[in-house]
Amino acid sequence: MAARYTLKIVADFAAAHLLRDYPGVCGRLHGHNWKVEVEVTAHKLNAVGMGVDFNDLKAATRSELAELDHRNLNDLIPFDRINPTAENISAYLFERLGSRLNSEIARVTAVTLWETERCCVRYTEE
């Protein structure tokens, strides 16, 4: 059986958003303290014995989240065109982190975005 290592880090950011064309209260500007879980899968290890260095994973995540932190997400590309739903934000982070972290031995395989402590979405690609 092939080896599989799943590495995960958790980070957070605070940001506001509103959902355009939404008929309920989420159509009004409001904020969240978002929690982000980033999962990376490796099928082999590097010379040091790591699938990906946690420091690199945390730094890339912090850098991407810094662009969103304490902002109105509706003002940022691509959320000036698409609604900043948890689904769209998690897909956005998945793509951005994958472009920074994916390598021959490790790939970003999931981003889970918690809008509240009881509501989250997990984005993956098959």
Image: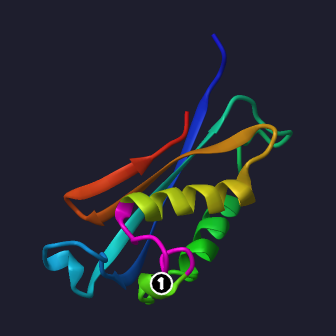
Whether 105 is drawn above or below 87: the answer is: above
Q: Is residue 59 left or right of residue 72?
A: right
Where residue 29 sits in the image (x, y, percent)?
26, 88
Whether 72 is drawn above or below 35: the answer is: below
The residue drawn where x is 54% and y is 62% is 92
Q: Is residue 119 left or right of residue 69?
A: left
Q: Which residues are magenta?
A: 77-86
Where residue 101 sits in the image (x, y, percent)?
72, 55
Whether 71 is drawn above or below 85: the answer is: below
| Residues packed near mark 1 inside 10 Å, few (<14), some (14 to 19) or many (20 plus) | some
Quarter holding the N terminus?
top right
Q: Is residue 83 left or right of residue 117?
A: right
Judged from this view, the residue extending furthest toward the left is 24
Q: Quadrant of residue 126?
A: top right
The residue drawn where x is 34% and y is 52% is 121
Q: Nearer the viewer, residue 17 or 48?
A: 17
Q: Quadrant of residue 82?
A: bottom left
Where residue 25 sits in the image (x, y, percent)?
14, 78
Q: Quadrant of residue 55?
A: bottom right
Disc 1 residue type?
A: Asp
- As helix, strand or loop, the secondary structure at mark 1 comes to loop
